[in-house]
Amino acid sequence: MVKVKNYIGQFHPIVWVLLIGTVLSRGSAFMTLPFLSIYLSRTMDLSPIIIGLTVGMSPLMGTVGGFIGGHLSDRFGRKPVMLISLFAVAFVYYGFTIATGQGWFILLNAINGLSNSFFEPTSQALMADLTDKERRMKVYSLRYTAMNIGASVGPLIGAYLATTSAKLSFAITGTTYLLYAIVLVYFLNKLVIQNHQGQHVKKNVSFGDAFRIIRTDKALRYLIIGITLINMGYAQIDSNLPQVLEGKFENGVLIFSSLLSINAIMVVFLQMPISHLAEKFRLMQVMFVGSFFIGAGLIGFSFVNGWVTAILAMVLVTLGEILIFPSNSLMIDQLAPEHLRGTYFGAGQFRKIGNFLGPIFGGFLLSHFQGQIMFLAIAIITLFSIVFFLRGNRLFLKMKSIDSKAI
């Protein structure tokens, strides 16, 4: 019992609220959004292009919205940006329950992507504000674990509700976000010290100034390019891998669903012990190994010939995922000046371009060549991220050296 109390005591209560909220909100979101296209195709006479546009509006808005939201949190504080975003998401899901036209769904999902892109970098920045530097890798790992717990449970409930009452799933998700926002209002008012709101009070930076700072930070730019290439590879798991498996095997759908379960279970149970081990190594070494594992897993999928090779490839990809995504958050945290942490985390949202381009480029290769060529080409692109990570790290170390000499 004492150990549990000591472990909980490592982090600010607000951090735990955000982690628990992440499990519930991600679980409810994954209960609805993966089945939005099914709902639209069943209830409306829409073409696949319109359905794709509707579903794609959320990540498209999130690509640029994160930078804006992160910067606003630096200027005006974490609290207003986070709370307005959460209430807006709740409004979106309640809106889904009564929307009747395609225009409303496109608009609501655009607001959904924009609001989430405001909340994500701001919540990460607040976690960093409230956590000692030596514990931030652990808190980013916990956050990633929380996301995957929600992502593993949500679709199971959503699959049932999709066949019974999709509108009920929208209402449940909206209520979850509403309660999350209300609880966060209570704890932020009760616990957060003013100094934790960020250093924006001392150093007020305009949007134009923030954009120029990000544009001139070459280390951050190399990091974003590298993680974008990683996302291009990782996006194949949800987009083109199921098509390849279904085309090669009679039980391809069963194999794919089993791989998703293996991925979720591995992340939930291995994220913290692997992250604890990774803390003993330099951050760039961890990202290098993570990139290698994801690239190796994609190469494995190019040679898949049954259950064993498919599972082995997914294990490699998952190990890379466990290593690289929390490390990416910590790297952005180390690059960011205190008064621009939200802006830097927001700029990190530009990596979602990889989630947008990956399925398109992979689909193009798959339609013109076989799956093996597609996965090999994507794997090479993914491994090329190592070059950008190494270059970014070199510039970061050079900057630190200059700063230490100046002091």
Image: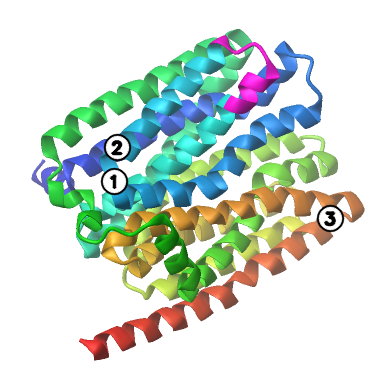
Amino acid at pointer 1: Phe
Amino acid at pointer 2: Pro
Badge 3: residue crowd in 10 Å (few <14, some 14–19, many ≥20): some
Tell me: 160 left or right of 38: left
Q: Which numbered circle lies on residue 80?
A: 2
Q: Which portion, as a residue range, is magenta?
A: 98-107
- Residue 119 in the image: state x and y as whole percent: 39, 40
Looking at the image, which residue is at 63% across and 36% down? Answer: 57
**Relative to the observer, which residue lies in front, 171 or 73?**
73
Badge 2: residue crowd in 10 Å (few <14, some 14–19, many ≥20): few
Residue 318 shows up from this direction: no
Q: Which residue is mark 3?
A: 365
Q: Secondary structure at mark 2?
A: helix
Looking at the image, which residue is at 42% across and 68% down? Answer: 213
- Quadrant of the frame with the N terminus: top left
Q: Which numbered circle lies on residue 76?
A: 1
Looking at the image, which residue is at 70% across and 46% down? Answer: 307
Q: Which quadrant of the structure image shows residue 343?
A: bottom left
Query: Mark 2 near mark 1, Cβ–Cβ under 8 Å?
Result: yes
- Residue 117 in the image: state x and y as whole percent: 47, 42
- Residue 403 in the image: state x and y as whole percent: 29, 84
Badge 1: residue crowd in 10 Å (few <14, some 14–19, many ≥20): some
